Amino acid sequence: MAQKPSIPKGTRDFSPSEVIKRNYIFDIIKKHFQTFGFQPIETPSFENSETLMGKYGDEGDRLIFNILNSGDFLSKVDDSLYNSRDSNKITPGISEKALRYDLTVPFARYVVMHQNELDFPFKRYQIQPVWRADRPQKGRFREFYQCDADVVGSDSLLQEVELIQLYDTVFNDLKLEGVIIKLNNRKILAGIAEVIGAKDLLIDFTVALDKLDKIGEDGVKKEMLSKGISESAIQKASPLFNLTGSNADQLDRLEELLKDSEEGSKGISELRFIMETITSLGLQSAKLVIDVTLARGLNYYTGAIFEVGAPEGVSMGSIGGGGRYDDLTGIFGLPNVSGVGISFGLDRIYLVMEELGLFPEAIDRSLDVLCLNFGAKEGLAALKLTTVLRKHGIKADIYPSDAKINKQFKYANNRKVPYVILLGTEELNNNSFVVKHMETGKQTTYALSKVETFIGGLQ
RNA sequence: GUGGUUGUAGCUCAGCUGGUUAGAGCGCUGGAUUGUGGUUCCAGAGGUCGCCGGUUCGAACCCGGUCUUCCACCCCA
């Protein structure tokens, strides 16, 4: 080995136990996507650059992985453009494809392209990796999985309600209790900006407000000032900085604040409907809270905004997010189709579950039974036995060579195999086999003709 | 993209102001135990000290660059 091999920054290999645990999460998410009536689709890992560019804001564009054209692409670049050394201008000329940045925009593209084949409302789920050229941190990777469920073609608020139930159902089934589903509405944010006279600074206003729990009231005010939001506007918005109390109390105060804004009032009534409906239906283990500071950078949300935080005491960014977007397919030429969706961040959910020790105990047990190998004749008999066990759906294997029994036992131990079968010369002669229960050390002899007795005892 | 941080055996980590042959625990291999693991005892293997360059008589240690890790911004799952 001339040089140690490596993998790109922010990517990971997954070993057997990790894959099994990841699949455990995938399976539960997928199961509930299906019981809620979502249908699966998949889209290419890379899209045409123009499909993705400009959909995620300037920051998003920077984080998109571009794919270099094939062939002698540089020779086709105009001389003056080439000499400008301006990456932003040259990139479109040498890169026409880019890796998928999320699942929502490709889905919007899919809906537009397949609109005549789809029955609306169309509920789709999609579980695929996405890529971002971000600087990695804990829980932040350059390749990670998103698990999305979206509904297009219905502007009913029942969709929002169902999506909250879906979050609750999945996290409850994962035994990840106490997750916090934060709920806000873009119309409320817009209404506030309108009421305080900073309508054209909506994005700056919300981005600053979003940082309230991080940099505090003074920090937020400072950032707003620096973005050109006036002192008096900030003063008007100040009730937001310490909006506490029950969800209902907060709604009442917001309603008062927004009474002169048609859009804001609409946002309040939407939020109120969702809260009241969920309250009457009840949640299993998630907590639903209103959080007016919840902004999220994605600029296509127009109604509800969701974000899921890990249970208290676990330091991890959001493990899920979503919202409603009225005009996403409009960008691709299909106006007036409303969509709402949520996403589960598989990789972060994994980290949280690992930290809290929530995976089932024997989840990575890859073998139920290992037959030891005592030689050619005995090994063949053991293989026959292994075959029978496999036909009964038991995860069984035979040690491939007649290595020292000590070594074979050690292997079984390391693989955490609960039962080891010994079938040596003695057993072969009297048509029997010995089962050793590794945990207790207890050994039981069975007749080869009565394998079922052993299988029956395996529970 | 900005600022900082980390890298020594398969893993977790020691290694003094720069000084001879870079250590430990766990794991691995062999033996005590040629059909009994997880406990114990004995022995052994395993390292271009992330990589490239510089300073020096001499570099794991100092300097520069680069890659990687993690952290804070930015943003986000």
Image (cartoon, rainbow, N blue to C red):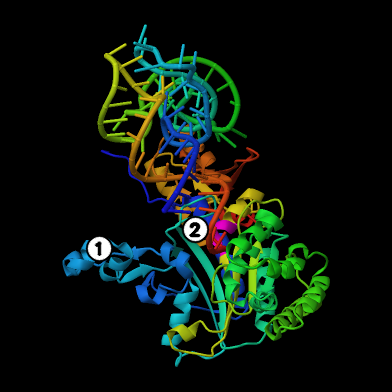
Q: Tag 1, which chain?
A: A
User: x%, y% of residue A157?
Assistant: 68, 84
Q: Position of residue B33 (x, y in %)?
A: 48, 23
Residue at position x 45%, y 93% in the image: A116
Q: Amino acid at mark 2?
A: Arg
Image-based side of A40 in relation to A291, left or right = left
In terms of sequence position, does the residue under pointer 1 or pointer 2 come before the other?
1
- Residue A84's disc is 1
Q: Are marks 1 and 2 on the same chain?
A: yes
- Mark 1 and mark 2: span between their CA atoms? 66 Å
Q: Main secondary structure of the magenta part?
A: helix
> Which is nearer the eye, A141 or A409?
A141
Return the residue nearer the eye: A155 or B12.
A155
Find disc 2 in the rendering and name its residue: A390
Q: Residue at x 63, y 40 (%)?
A: A439
Q: Quadrant of residue A444?
A: top right
Whether residue A281 appears in this view of the structure is no
- Please, what is the three-letter code of the amino acid marked with disc 1? Ser
Q: Which residues are magenta?
A: A345-349
